[in-house]
Image: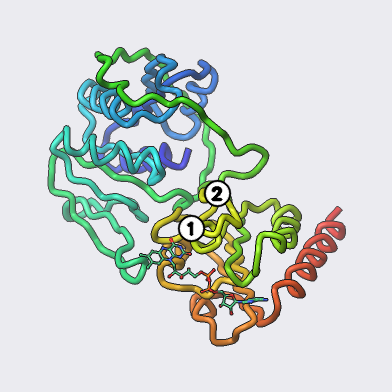
Amino acid sequence: MELLQYAATIAANSGTTVTALVLGTTTEAEMSSLGNYGANKVLHVSDARLDNLNSAAYTKALVTAAQQEQAQVIVTAHDVTGKAVAPRVAARLQAGLVAGAVSYPDMTNGFVVKKTVFAGKAIAHVNISSAIKVITLISNTFPVKPGAGTATVAALSVDFTDKDFAVKVTAVNKVTGTVPLSEAELVVSGGRGMKGPENWGVLIDLAGSLGAALACSRPVADSHWRPHHEHVGQTGGTIRPNLYIAVGISGAIQHLAGVNGSKTIVVINKDPEAPFFKAADYGVIGDAMEVVPRLTAAVQKFKESQN
Ligand SMILES: Cc1cc2nc3c(=O)[nH]c(=O)nc-3n(C[C@H](O)[C@H](O)[C@H](O)COP(=O)(O)OP(=O)(O)OC[C@H]3O[C@@H](n4cnc5c(N)ncnc54)[C@H](O)[C@@H]3O)c2cc1C
């Protein structure tokens, strides 16, 4: 939804339209609802083999759609799918690529997109000078506001060969019942200061009371205290939630790289010298096992007072 709005803004500024590409099994209603977020047209490749990410086949579908539509700008999310597909599409179309954009393109003098570099320490202004441009956008960069547009839906036929499906997905284990981390507006994250997986209950309770997703630092995932999909940072996910609560995390630069785009950062750490406090909007110096349950109780009390 965010991508469609992003594309719609670029299209409006360049006097063109937005085509969304939908791959795999879906419903007519879901596709036409994309009009509410800025799509003028939806192209659907109805092939169940596309239900799971397959970078070769997705690349071919996106290149086919882009060529048919004579797309000037192609946007994907900066997620596992986008990171696998966008560079391949850019290479096929001889297009410049900005991976991990955090701004709309500035088209006043060229086509300049901002992205964070050096683990979030600096912002690069990248000018794409090729005719076709490819951008992967970091999720949660812009708020999503549904509108009342409509989109036409058309089938797209792609000339797949067996080679495009050389990689086969044999099993999919979906995480259920939690907010996907990349889309979460509120995130509660734990580090090595939590001492062990047996102490995660306090973070799960806080996340539950806030309706937040859970995240963690890399050593936590490496030690199998938490699953790897919760790992954020330079080598993990990049997130930009409205609120990031970091508990028992020192704030190493590699960790900050994945979270310093968060709108508000709260740090709970027993060491007043922990580097994370420098990046924090609010800090609590204290023991996680004492502070977090009290924070959860305060959230519960606040929620009750609102009912
Ligand atoms: C190439 C490379 C890539 C990396 N990528 C990532 C990445 O993507 N993500 C990532 O997170 N790291 C990454 N790292 C590792 C990173 O450098 C740090 O080692 C890591 O982030 C530290 O994790 P931590 O803050 O959980 O643990 P620690 O650094 O051990 O910090 C634990 C913190 O908990 C506090 N604490 C201890 N007990 C308590 C308590 N009872 N209550 C409250 N606070 C307490 C301590 O004061 C300390 O600040 C990478 C490193 C390299 C070299």
Name the amino acid, label 2: Leu
Q: Secondary structure at mark 1?
A: loop
Residue found 24% across the figure and 22% down from its top: 64
Residue assigned mark 1: 232
Q: How is the image coloured?
A: rainbow
Ligand 1 within 8 angstroms of badge 1 C-beta: yes
Residue 186: image location, x then y, percent: 61, 56
Task: Decide: few, some or many residues near mark 1? Use Cα within 10 Å; few <14, some 14-19, many ≥20.
Answer: many
Foreground residue among 66 and 191? 191
Is residue 91 toward the left or the right of residue 303 in the image?
left
Q: Is residue 129 above or below residue 73?
A: below
Residue assigned mark 2: 181
Q: Secondary structure at mark 2?
A: helix
Foreground residue among 235 and 256? 235
Residue found 46% across the figure and 42% down from its top: 2
Is residue 136 toward the left or the right of residue 243 in the image?
left
Verify CB contact (< 8 Å) between mark 1 and mark 2: yes
The image quarter in which residue 58 lies: top left
Which mark sits nearer the N-terminus, 1 or 2?
A: 2
Q: Is residue 208 above or below residue 89?
A: below
Residue 280: image location, x then y, percent: 54, 75
